[in-house]
């Protein structure tokens, strides 16, 4: 019998500090509580005029050229459809090009020192307290705590550690992971000796990550001026964290400062492609948009510091009306939280030159698509937020951009299909040269193939130029040039990245088109834990998932060839990407291929050549294998200290109303009662039933009284 449980006596909880409640009222999208927006600097308005003017000019030029391609003998309805789709899609990529061009010039001009953050200056002294929040949901506890320990130690090394507390905010629903989290947390406390690292597990993960952060805010937010929000895969240097806190202290009107996270630890080809592209091309976009965003920037949900007063006062998210997937809790909460804070006059800024901010990437296209499906639903939910009253027009643009990033995929698909249908009609359907009604001249179906080639080439150029500019900008900086393998290898990496992403793009087009269609049909994405490690490639699974892509590729290729060989040549990027979908996903999911490319000096990033100390520390800690995990109930019965800590950290159950029955707990206790040993009980219980036992003190005491067996 476990004496601590039998006596209902537990050791003092290492769990949480005294609560300092802070009200966080739910905001109305239609009745703003405050609109005292700070004045936008005149130069910011001029910058925006330049960005949108240049985008409009490029789009007008592309629209004119495409119109000339299609209107040779008059514009038919299908041709007008193609033209309209082309203009919409061309504007999208033109906007990206303009931002990249501006970012290129900004990088050549040097660091931007946003909000006075100068990484060459001494670290600021701090006078306020900041909470570092690490939400986690069914993640590997050992790796989560390893990263957190590296962050804690890095901040402590700055000499400003006394100004920070750390909170692991668990929404974990897997009972085995829950107990491993607690064990990893206690081990972290033992290793660090810290009294400022806290752990809280929510019994019910209402509103997901947004609800997790909001719950912390209402309980503990009153004790802190700022909160630094991380993801489970986030890593930040102490230098960066302290400079962010210092910037918030100096700029009282700043509600949020978003860093530009660099992707690290990519082992598969897919992850290394994302890592290289984000590191080499990403700074152009980040510097470009920061240049004209000003105080109306955006929030990406992690690796950002937020003023608690602004968040609590303005970011209480409402429920969207209607059923899922469009109604209910807001999934992509970050965009909306930033928009609401900005609506009330708080500045939302980006610091793209700060550095020291890192994250990880899904290891495969399949895992990326699972996460992307959830993001797709969250962004399409923003259709219900767009009309909200009082939002700054740039905040609306952020929402619209998020929606557009998914809507463009079905638009590209329709554009390709309609264009192919026009070609098939011209080839196989007898044209009606003299339509009904009086006509002196025949109507010849025709397009201008020479001008079409120029339009195609120009469009491809707009897509590729930002990549070349990103590479060139990196080559102008010694650290970047050496860190990416030198001029020749880095340029070879750019070519490889272009080839691989060209093969992936048609696959993603179909995946996102399907996601949009499912959401429009009412299918909810749910909430799955993110897979961080590369798994074994299952050809049968890939065939089932990507077989339709291959079939469509064959159909498109055959249809194009039926018209002409040149048309097939034009459609080769799309056809090849779809036909090769299965081997492309298999190869890009391979760690062996990723390691081979790294040995060859391809797809390198500077953080691999000269890893930051915080990364090396996190990797070293993660490499230390944790103790083998027994089933949660068995482990708690064997480890009195862990069991006592688990009981001490349990949330108090809400008062039960008469007639309410926790079915999972009732069934779990009945099953457990039939078991002769703890091991047998653990085997009989489902995941949900085990969770119910772990969340109830009396039920847990009954189970661990049994012999271990």
Image (spheres, rainbow, N blue to C red):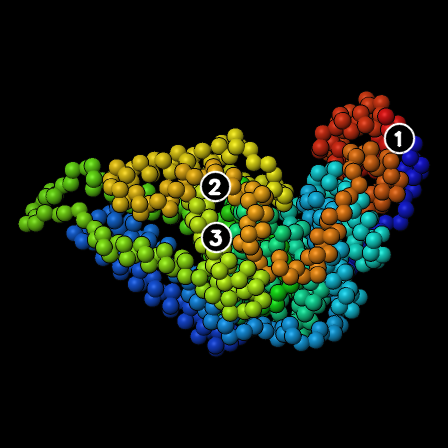
Q: Secondary structure at mark 2?
A: helix
Q: Height in image: 116 above or below 308?
A: below
Q: Secondary structure at mark 1?
A: loop
**Farthest residue in the left direction?**
440
Disc 1 packing (10 Å; few <14; some 14–19; many ≥20): some
Residue 12: x percent and y percent? 89, 49
Q: Secondary structure at mark 3?
A: helix
Residue identifier under label 3: 497
**Does label 2 or label 1 sit earlier along the sequence?**
2
Q: Residue at x 21, y 53 (%)?
A: 448
How far apart, in angstroms, are the residues tagged by discs 2 and 3?
13 Å
Q: Nearer the viewer, residue 276 or 231?
A: 276
**Does label 2 or label 3 sit earlier along the sequence?**
3
Residue 442 in view, yes or no: yes
Q: Height in image: 662 above or below 411?
A: above
Residue identifier under label 2: 584
Q: Write down the quadrant of residue 352 in the picture.
A: bottom right
């Amino acid at each position: 019998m476990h004496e601590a449980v039998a006596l209902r006596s537990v050791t003092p909880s290492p769990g949480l500090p005294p609560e300092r409640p802070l009200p966080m009222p739910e905001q109305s999208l239609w009745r703003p509580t405050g609109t005292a927006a700070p004045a936008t600097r005149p130069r910011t308005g001029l910058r925006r005029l330049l960005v949108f003017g240049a985008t409009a000019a490029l789009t007008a030029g592309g629209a004119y050229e495409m119109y000339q391609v299609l209107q040779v003998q008059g514009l038919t309805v299908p041709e007008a459809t193609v033209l309209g789709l082309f203009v919409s899609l061309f504007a999208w990529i033109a906007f990206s090009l303009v931002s990249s061009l501006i970012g290129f010039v900004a990088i050549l001009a040097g660091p931007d020192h946003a909000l006075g953050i100068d990484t060459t200056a001494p670290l600021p002294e701090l006078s306020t307290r900041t909470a570092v929040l690490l939400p986690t949901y069914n993640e590997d506890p050992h790796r989560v705590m390893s990263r957190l320990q590296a962050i804690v130690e890095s901040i402590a090394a700055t000499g400003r550690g006394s100004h920070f507390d750390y909170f692991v905010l668990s929404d974990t629903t897997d009972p085995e992971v829950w107990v491993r989290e607690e064990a990893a947390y206690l081990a972290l406390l033992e290793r660090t000796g810290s009294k400022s690292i806290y752990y809280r597990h929510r019994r019910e993960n209402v509103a997901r990550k947004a609800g997790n952060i909001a719950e912390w805010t209402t309980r503990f937010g009153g004790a802190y001026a700022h909160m630094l929000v991380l993801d489970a895969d986030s890593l930040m240097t102490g230098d960066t964290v302290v400079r962010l806190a210092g910037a918030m202290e100096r700029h009282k009107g700043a509600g949020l400062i978003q860093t530009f996270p660099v992707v690290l630890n990519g082992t598969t080809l897919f992850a290394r492609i994302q890592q290289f592209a984000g590191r080499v091309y990403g700074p152009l976009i980040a510097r470009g948009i920061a240049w004209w965003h000003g105080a109306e920037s955006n929030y990406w949900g992690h690796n950002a510091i937020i003023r608690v007063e602004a968040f609590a006062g303005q970011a209480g998210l409402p429920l969207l009306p209607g059923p899922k997937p469009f109604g209910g809790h807001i999934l992509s909460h970050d965009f909306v939280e930033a928009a609401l804070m900005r609506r009330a006059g708080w500045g939302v800024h980006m610091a793209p030159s700060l550095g020291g901010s890192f994250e990880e990437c899904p290891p495969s296209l399949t895992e990326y698509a699972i996460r992307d499906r959830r993001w797709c639903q969250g962004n399409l939910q923003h259709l219900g937020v767009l009309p909200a009253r009082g939002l700054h027009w740039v905040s609306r643009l952020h929402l619209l951009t998020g929606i557009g990033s998914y809507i463009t995929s079905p638009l590209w698909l329709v554009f390709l299909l309609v264009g192919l249908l026009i070609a098939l009609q011209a080839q196989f359907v007898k044209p009606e040269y003299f339509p009904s009604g009086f006509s002196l001249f025949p109507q010849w179906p025709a397009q201008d193939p020479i001008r079409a080639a120029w339009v195609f080439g120009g469009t491809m150029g707009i897509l590729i130029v930002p990549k070349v500019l990103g590479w060139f900008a990196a080559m102008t900086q010694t650290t970047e040039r050496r860190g990416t393998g030198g001029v020749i290898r880095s340029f070879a990496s750019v070519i490889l990245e272009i080839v691989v992403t060209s093969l992936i793009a048609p696959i993603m087009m179909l995946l996102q088109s399907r996601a949009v269609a499912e959401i429009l049909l009412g299918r909810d994405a749910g909430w799955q834990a993110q897979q961080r490690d590369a798994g074994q490639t299952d050809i049968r699974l890939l065939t089932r998932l990507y077989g339709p892509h291959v079939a469509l590729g064959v159909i498109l290729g055959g249809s194009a060839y039926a018209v002409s060989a040149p048309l097939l040549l034009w459609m080769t990027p799309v056809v090849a990407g779809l036909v090769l979908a299965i081997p492309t996903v298999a190869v890009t999911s391979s760690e062996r291929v990723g390691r081979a490319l790294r040995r060859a000096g391809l797809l390198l990033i500077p953080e691999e050549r000269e890893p930051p100390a915080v990364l090396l520390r996190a990797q070293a800690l993660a490499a230390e294998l944790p103790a083998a995990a027994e089933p949660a109930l068995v482990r708690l019965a064997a480890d009195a200290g862990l069991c006592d800590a688990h009981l001490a950290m349990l949330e108090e159950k809400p008062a039960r109303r008469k007639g309410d029955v926790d079915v999972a707990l009732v069934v779990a206790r009945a099953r457990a009662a039939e078991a002769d040993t703890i091991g047998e009980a653990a085997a009989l219980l489902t995941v949900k039933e085990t969770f119910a036992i772990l969340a109830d003190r009396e039920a847990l005491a009954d189970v661990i009284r049994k012999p271990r067996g």
